[in-house]
């Protein structure tokens, strides 16, 4: 149990375009989902926390107009990178948790390359 | 803000040895601690969590927590080459706006050589 999927697993896009990444909890209801970004050789950096039906809470320094997060249901959250630039190229990982547990279940990640 | 410190390594041990990974945290009130393993190019996977002082064993893995000294460690017995990965220590936020949020250390890279 406790499986989180992400789609796509990798994507290449041109500078200036937008990319949407989906995060789904397959067998549980995720009241909270987290979005992380990881650059090579670095640890995970939390970008934002989203609770179902509420606006996402962004970490300091993360542009909310650039990284749009929607958590419209208990099984789906999306991250849209708008007007992507090469410096947005990174590994984006989501995680999800239920209301009754601290444990976070991680998705497999999405590797974004902006050319 | 919760600070989590880990030696970045790399830590290199021979196959069959015990690998010891250490982590310290800044918030004395922290209650819950997690160890994740991350293979290169993959997302983290949970190895163990620990809430209480002392040792917690799961197979070849033992987590140790000392809240008075504010450190948590992970021991890997009979290390295997497949254990070669980056190990991330994480502390969970347990109040207010930090509730449920994980604070990660930078990770320790472990290499087990045959």
Image (cartoon, rainbow, N blue to C red):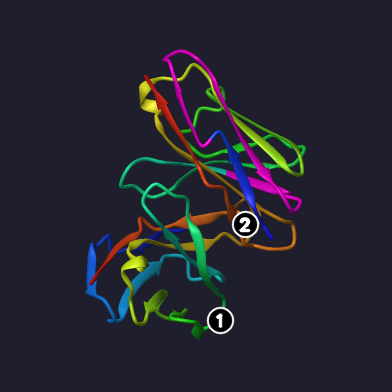
**Residue A18 within the magenta-colored segment of the rendering:** yes
Where does label 2 land, which residue?
B100
Front one among B5 and B85 = B85
Image vertical order of residue B13 relative to residue B102, above or below: below
Tell me if mark 1 has few (under 14), some (14-19) or many (20+) residues whose alpha carbon lies within 10 angstroms of its own.
some
Mark 2 and mark 1 residues within 8 Å of each other at the beta carbon: no
| Chain holding disc 1 | B
Q: Is residue B59 left or right of residue B17?
A: right
Q: Earlier in the sequence, mark 2 or mark 1?
A: 1
| Chain holding disc 2 | B
Image vertical order of residue A20 relative to residue A103, above or below: above
**Quadrant location of residue A70?**
top right
**Quadrant location of residue A38?**
top left
Image coords of residue B85 (percent x, y): 35, 61
Q: Is residue B20 left or right of residue B89?
A: left
Q: Is residue B100 left or right of residue A42?
A: right
Task: Please report the bounds of the magenta region as a residue range.
Answer: A9-34
Q: Which mark is residue B52?
A: 1
Q: Residue at x 64, y 46 (%)?
A: A33
Front one among A35 and A1 = A1
**Residue A6 within the magenta-colored segment of the rendering:** no
**In the structure shown, which secondary structural element does the residue marked by tag 1 occupy?**
loop
Image coords of residue A68 (percent x, y): 60, 27
Q: Which residue is drawn at 43% across and 81% down?
A: B60
Tell me if mark 2 has few (under 14), some (14-19) or many (20+) residues whose alpha carbon lies within 10 angstroms of its own.
many
Q: Distance between the residues labelled 2 and 1?
A: 18 Å
């Amino acid at each position: 149990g406790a499986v989180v999927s992400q789609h796509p697993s990798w994507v290449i896009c041109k500078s200036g375009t937008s990319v949407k990444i989906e995060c789904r909890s397959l067998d549980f209801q995720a009241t909270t989902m987290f979005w992380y970004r990881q650059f090579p050789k670095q640890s995970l950096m939390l970008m934002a926390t989203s609770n179902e039906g509420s606006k996402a809470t962004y970490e300091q320094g993360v542009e909310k107009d650039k990284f749009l997060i929607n958590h419209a249901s208990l099984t789906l959250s999306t991250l849209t990178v708008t007007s992507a630039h090469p410096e947005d190229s990174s590994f984006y990982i989501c995680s999800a948790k239920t209301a009754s547990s601290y444990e976070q279940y991680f998705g497999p990640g999405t590797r974004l390359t902006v050319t | 803000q919760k600070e989590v410190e880990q030696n970045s390594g790399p830590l290199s041990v021979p196959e069959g040895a015990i690998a010891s990974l250490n982590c310290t945290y800044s918030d004395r009130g922290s209650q819950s601690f997690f160890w994740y393993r991350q293979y290169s190019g993959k997302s983290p996977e949970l190895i163990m969590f620990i809430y209480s002082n002392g040792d917690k064993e799961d197979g070849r893995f033992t987590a140790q927590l000392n809240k008075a000294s504010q450190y948590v460690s992970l021991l890997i017995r009979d290390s295997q080459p497949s254990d070669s990965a980056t190990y991330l220590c994480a502390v969970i936020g347990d109040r207010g706006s930090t509730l449920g949020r994980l604070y990660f250390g930078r990770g320790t890279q472990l290499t087990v050589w045959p």
